[in-house]
Image (cartoon, rainbow, N blue to C red):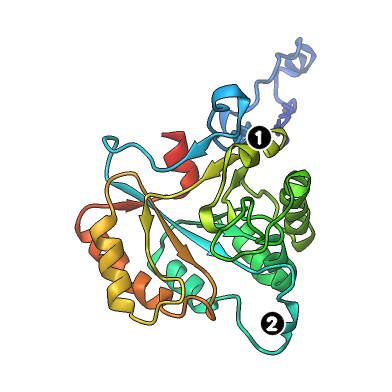
Amino acid sequence: MITLVRRVTAACVLSAALAACAATPQPVRPAPSATTTAPSAPPTLAPGPGGLTPVFMNGSRTHGRTVALTFDADMTADQGARAAAGEHFDNPGLIAALRELKVPATVFMTGRWAEQYPEQARSLGRDPLFEVANHSYSHYAFTGDCYGLPTVSGDRMRADVERAYAAFRRAGVPDARPYFRFPGGCYDRRALKALTPVGVTAVQWDVVSGDAFATDAEAVTRQVLEGVRPGSVVVMHCTRSAAPTTERVVRTVVPQLRERGFRFVKVSELIGS
C-alpha cells in the first residue's frame, strides 16, 4: 500500500519579462487525484466472553434486504487419490454462474482444495466479486461426533487453520479474509479458545440450503427461498461430486430473491454493517 505523490515542476517560459524566471519558486501542491487511500482491513467481530473467538451467525435484520451466499469448497487431507481418479471437488460451472449473474459471494476454502485446484483458488482470490475465507486445511472436525468426520486434536487446531492460510498464499490468493468456518459447523468452547490466537471471526449461517448430497434442485431451492431473511447467511457447497444441484439452485434462487428486493453481498459487508 503506497501513497503516490506526483511532483509537478513549473518551467520558466521565455518572454519579454525574462526577469520573471528569477522569481522565488512557489511550492507546488500535488493534484487531489494523485493521492490514493490504502484499503481498510476487513471487518471482524470483537472477541467473545473470556477472549474467545467470536461467532457470526447473520447480519442485521433491519439495515436493508441483504443476503450473503457462501460456498464451502470442501476437500479433506486424504482425498487426493479420489481426485486423481476423476472425482470433482470443484465446480467451475457454479463459479461461472455467479460471475454471469454478478453475484458477490464468500468461498470458504480448505487448504487441501487450494492445493488441488491452485489456478481456481488464485482466480477466485483475485476476482473482486469473491472473497476467500478459511475452512481449515484438512476439513477434519474440531469436535467429536461431527457428521462422521475425522477429528483434529485440540493441540493441532490452530496449526490446521494456519496451514490453510499458507496453502492459499502458495496458490496465489493475495488476501484471504480473517474468517473461519468450522468443518460441519461443529465447534465448542475448546475449539473457540484454540483459535483465539489466530484472530479470526468464526462464521456460521442461519439458512441451511440442504444442497449437500442433494439430487432434487427444486427442494433445495424451496428451502433457500423459504429460509432467507434480511441479513441471512446461506451455506451452500462448491463441490460437484457432493453437491451436484448447486449451480441450478443458484440460477433459480438469485433472480427470485432479487425480485423480492434482496441485494447480494459478501460476508465482510454483513459483518461490517
For the residue carrying disc 1, how many other residues have a C-alpha within 10 Å: few (<14), some (14-19), or many (20+)?
A: some
Q: 69 or 22, which is in the foreground?
A: 69
- Looking at the rendered image, the disc whose residue lies closer to the viewer, 2 or 1, is 1
Which residue does the image show at 38% across and 67% down from the upper left? 210
Q: Can residue 162 be seen in this view?
A: no
Disc 2 crowd, CA 10 A, few/some/many (<14, 14-19, 20+)? some
Which residue is farthest bottom? 85
Q: Could you tell me the amino acid type at mark 2?
A: Ala
Please give the name of the residue rendered at 54% of the width and 63% of the height, measured from the top-left corner: 147
Residue 83, which numbered label? Answer: 2
Q: Which of 30 and 251 is in front in this view?
A: 251
- Compared with residue 25, is residue 39 higher up or lower down, i.e. above or below? below
Residue wearing tag 1: 193
Residue at image position (62%, 60%) is 109
- The C terminus lies in quadrant: top left
Of callouts 2 and 1, which one flags the residue occurring earlier in the amino acid sequence? 2
